[in-house]
Image (cartoon, grey):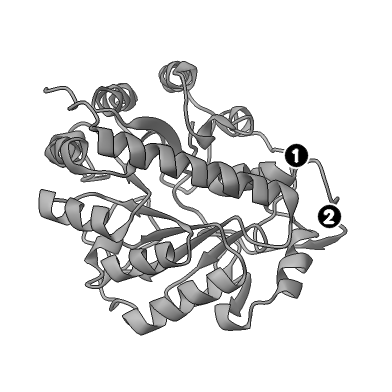
C-alpha cells in the first residue's frame, strides 16, 4: 500500500490555524460553564448501509431542508456552542451538506463530521475543503466486509488514499473490537493503515448481539492494550474512563449532557445523546440558558454505565466543579459503543 503524501505548506498552515482555534475554545470552556462545548446535529437519518449493531439510521427519511438546518445552526451559535459535529444516518447523502458546513464556519465554530466514507471521491473531498470542514471521522469495522458490517478496509482503502492526497481537514479512523467482530486483529490492521496515511487512529467497543456490554476477552484485550499504547495527539487521549468500560464496570463521573454536550436529532429536538433520545426532548428553538444551567447541575442515573466517548471527554472539562444537586433517570438504549483512544 502506498504511503501518505507529505503535507503541503498550505495544509500545515491550515492545521496550525485549526489548532489555535481549538486551544481558544478549550480556554473559553474552562473560563465559563454557560455554553455548550459540543453539539452533534443530524441533517439526514437515512443511511446507505445497514450495520447490524447500529440504531441510528433508517432507509426512508428525507433530508432536513437546508433553511431549517441553517436555523438550527444559528440557534446553536446563539447558545454559544463551540464545536458542531454533523452525523446521521449518513450526512453525505444530504444534498446541501456543504452549506451546512459553511454555516457552521460562518459563526466561527469548529465543524466536524462523522461518515461511513462510501461517498467520498476527490471532487467531493475538495468541496468539503472549500466548505471549511475541520474534522472528519470514519469508523471501519473490519478488513473484509461481512454480514455484520460493510464498513471494511478493503472497500474504503481507496477512499482513505484520496483523503490523504486531497483533504485539508483532520481525519480520524475509528476501528472496533467486541461483540460481533470476528477478528479482533483487524483493528490493528486498520489502525496501522490510518497512521501510515497520516491520520489519527482510535478504537471502539461494540455490544454483543443482545445489546449488552461484556468484558473484553483475551485477544480483544491484547489488541485494545496495544492500540491504547500508541501515542495520541488529539483530545481522545483523555480516556481514563475506558478501563472500566473494557472491564464492563461502572464509572464515577459527572455527566454534563444537555448542557456542555447536546444531541440534536433530525426533528430539531435536544437530547442528552444518541442513546438517550427523548430526554429532555425539547425543541432547539426553545432551549435556553436556563435549560443549560439546569442540565449542568442534573445527575443522570445512566452515567455510571455510559459508553459515549464524546460526552465523557467533554465532561472532563468540568469534572472538578459544580457537584450535581438534582437527578434524572433517562431511558436506556443499546447501540454502538464508540470508545475513542
The residue singled out by tag 2 in the image is: 324
Instruction: Identify the secondary structure beneath mark 1.
Output: loop
Q: Which mark is residue 304?
A: none
Is there any visible trace of residue 203 in the rendered image? yes
Q: Label 1: how many residues lie within 10 Å, few (<14), some (14-19) or many (20+)?
A: few
Point 82% across, 46% down: residue: 321
Q: Position of residue 71 (x, y in %)?
A: 46, 80
Instruction: Identify the secondary structure beneath mark 2.
Output: loop
**Looking at this view, is 37 or 223 the one in front?**
37
Q: Position of residue 116 (x, y in %)?
A: 27, 50
Tell me the quarter of the picture where residue 89 sits: bottom left
The residue singled out by tag 1 in the image is: 252
Q: Mark 1 near mark 2, Cβ–Cβ under 8 Å?
A: no
Q: Position of residue 264 (x, y in %)?
A: 50, 69
Residue 118 vertical position relative to residue 258 in the rendered view, above or below: above
Residue 45 vertical position relative to residue 299 in the rendered view, above or below: below
The answer to whether 317 appears left or right of 164 in the picture is: right
Point 49% across, 31% down: residue: 341
> Mark 2 or mark 1, which is nearer the start of the sequence?
1
Tell me the quarter of the picture where residue 157 sits: top left
Amino acid at each position: 500500500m502506498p504511503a501518505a503524501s507529505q503535507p503541503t505548506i498550505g495544509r500545515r498552515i491550515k492545521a496550525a490555524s485549526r489548532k489555535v482555534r481549538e486551544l481558544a475554545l478549550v480556554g473559553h470552556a474552562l473560563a465559563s460553564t454557560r455554553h455548550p462545548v459540543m453539539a452533534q446535529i443530524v441533517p439526514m437519518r437515512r443511511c446507505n448501509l445497514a450495520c447490524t449493531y447500529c440504531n441510528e439510521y433508517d432507509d426512508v427519511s428525507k433530508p432536513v431542508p437546508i433553511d431549517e438546518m441553517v436555523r438550527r445552526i444559528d440557534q446553536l451559535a446563539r447558545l454559544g456552542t463551540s464545536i458542531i459535529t454533523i452525523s446521521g444516518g449518513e450526512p453525505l447523502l444530504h444534498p446541501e451538506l456543504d452549506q451546512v458546513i459553511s454555516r457552521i464556519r460562518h459563526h466561527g465554530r469548529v465543524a466536524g463530521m462523522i461518515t461511513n466514507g462510501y461517498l467520498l471521491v476527490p471532487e467531493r473531498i475538495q468541496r468539503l475543503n472549500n466548505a471549511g470542514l475541520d474534522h472528519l471521522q470514519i469508523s471501519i469495522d473490519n478488513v473484509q466486509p461481512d454480514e455484520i458490517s460493510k464498513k471494511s478496509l478493503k472497500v474504503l482503502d481507496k477512499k482513505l488514499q484520496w483523503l490523504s492526497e486531497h483533504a485539508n481537514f483532520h481525519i480520524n479512523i475509528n476501528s472496533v473490537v467486541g461483540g460481533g467482530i470476528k477478528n479482533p486483529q483487524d483493528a490493528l490492521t486498520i489502525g496501522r493503515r490510518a497512521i501510515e496515511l497520516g491520520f489519527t487512529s482510535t478504537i471502539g467497543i461494540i455490544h454483543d448481539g443482545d445489546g449488552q456490554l461484556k468484558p473484553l476477552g483475551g485477544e480483544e484485550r491484547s489488541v485494545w492494550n496495544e492500540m491504547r499504547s500508541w501515542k495520541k495527539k488529539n483530545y481522545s487521549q483523555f480516556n481514563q474512563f475506558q478501563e472500566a468500560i473494557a472491564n464492563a464496570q461502572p464509572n464515577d463521573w459527572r455527566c454534563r449532557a444537555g448542557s456542555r454536550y447536546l444531541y440534536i436529532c433530525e426533528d430539531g429536538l435536544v437530547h442528552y445523546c444518541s442513546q438517550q433520545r427523548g430526554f429532555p426532548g425539547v425543541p432547539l428553538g426553545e432551549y435556553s440558558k436556563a435549560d443549560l444551567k439546569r442540565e449542568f447541575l442534573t445527575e443522570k442515573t445512566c452515567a455510571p454505565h455510559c459508553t459515549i466517548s464524546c460526552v465523557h471527554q467533554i465532561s472532563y472539562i468540568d469534572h472538578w466543579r459544580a457537584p450535581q444537586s438534582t437527578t434524572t433517570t433517562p431511558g436506556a438504549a443499546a447501540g454502538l459503543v464508540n470508545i475513542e483512544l
